[in-house]
Amino acid sequence: MRALRSALLAALLAPGAALATAGYFQLGYGIKAKGMGGVAVALPQDALAAAANPAGMVWVGSRWDAGLEAFEADRGSEIRGNVLGLSGHRDANGRKRFPVPDFGWNRMLGEGRSVGVSVYGNGGTTRYADNPLASLGGSSPAGMELYQGIVAPSFAVKLGERHSVGVALNLVLQRFVARGIEHFDDPIFSQAPGSVTNRGHDRAAGLGVRLGWLGRVTGRTTLGASWQPKIRMQRFERYRGLLAEGGRFDVPENFAIGAAVKATPELTLAADLQRILFSTVPSLGRSSGCFLDETCLLGAADGAGSGWRNTTVLKLGVSWEAMPGLTLRGGVALLRSPIRPSDTLLAVFAPAVSEKHLTLGATWRLAPGRELSFSYQHAFPNAVQGSNSVPPGFPPGGVGGGEAAVRMKQRGFGVALGWAL
């Protein structure tokens, strides 16, 4: 019985995916990239380029870009066949619509160097009006929020006429809150009772780096690569009894390669392949097995995580200059959800299951050096059905057992203003 109740708690150890489409990462940064499936590693188009590849900033010129996306997410879960009163179909849409801003500025220092700053974010939220843990004494509303804001000053330099390298410092500020899991705020379950739930928003900061290279290897073909090591974050002290390692939630290592081909003077084809190592962050990737087996406590150095697996994101985009002053864009993005079918019971509070995405975009040149860009992205509905999604020791449909399914669909419409300096 304890094992089943403990398993449900692990759902709160991963970020909700209300604002993101690749786990808790966005597909791309900047409205132009979002209109092309998130492609940006080898195709810098604006002053948000450093978010994907800081080496691209030296190719976009002196400019600033400001964007705002209206993002909407529909997510929820269903638990079936559970005898503890946890069964039911519930949505996590206590808040369904979100503004997602971004900003970039870049300044050329002569012909071959640039300095800039890109500002963007990741994360999300789930909020259940009907707490899935209500039968265990959990209050409503229930859920969690994780917001991650990144300010990335960058420096890029050309190496000859065809290549460039760049570096961006990632100044990260995170905000986290968990609600409705009072049953586990107890010495039986946590190393720090009183620091598990309903403690209000807590903040943590961290400093990391992203490195990048871009090369125009032929007159038509450009290649790029970037790498961000794991960013060590401060602990969420108010939730040191919930998150592993005393409340630590690091930013996972991620890297990407990209290519862009100028098929004709008007038509550009591009692709990125991104790898996100969620499993390297204990609060995300560590197995919940030790907690289920009663050999560790929540928040401990060896505390449980959510079992998220690493994921690879394939992004494909096309840009077409339909007429002077008007560029049209389109793209797709495909990935495998970090949530396994065997872990759906652990994911009712974090249904990050979006896998297939379609995007559209356009830029209209208002005047020399002035432009207005638009984007639309659609994450097709997806659900992960539980497969033996019960804790060890409980047969499917047995005492306290059951199956769980989690679902998600998303869409977003964005607009940005670009201004050459």
Image (spheres, helix red, strand yellow):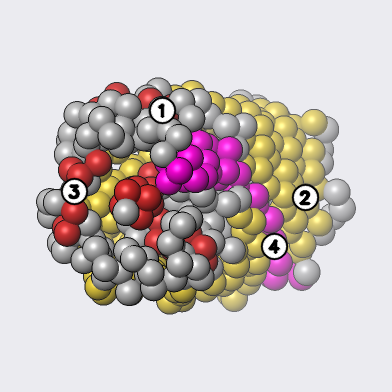
Badge 2 marks a residue whose secondary structure is strand
Q: Which residues are magenta?
A: 264-293
Residue kind at label 1, given as amino acid type: Ala
Q: Which residue is mark 3?
A: 180
Question: Could you say where residue 330 lies in the image, as x and y percent from the top left?
Answer: 57, 72
Q: CB under 8 Å between callouts 2 and 3?
A: no
State whether residue 57 appears in this view.
no
- Disc 4 to disc 3, how far (Cα)? 45 Å
Badge 4 marks a residue whose secondary structure is strand
Q: Residue at x 33, y 74 (%)?
A: 80
Against 241, residue 219 (above or below) is below
Image quadrant for the N terminus? bottom left
**Is residue 186 found inside the magenta-colored segment of the image?**
no
Residue kind at label 3, given as amino acid type: Gly
Badge 1 marks a residue whose secondary structure is loop
- Which of the marked residues, 2 or 4, is nearer the chain's N terminus? 2
Label 2 crowd bin: few (<14), some (14–19), many (20+), radius 10 Å: many
Label 4 crowd bin: few (<14), some (14–19), many (20+), radius 10 Å: many
Q: Residue at x 77, y 70 (%)?
A: 264
Q: Which residue is mark 2?
A: 223
Question: Could you say where residue 47 lies in the image, as x and y percent from the top left?
Answer: 51, 43
Question: Which mark is nearer the camera, 1 or 3?
Answer: 1
Q: Which residue is mark 1?
A: 300
Q: Residue at x 70, y 29 (%)?
A: 157
- Disc 2 to disc 1, how far (Cα)? 43 Å
Against 40, residue 397 (above or below) is below
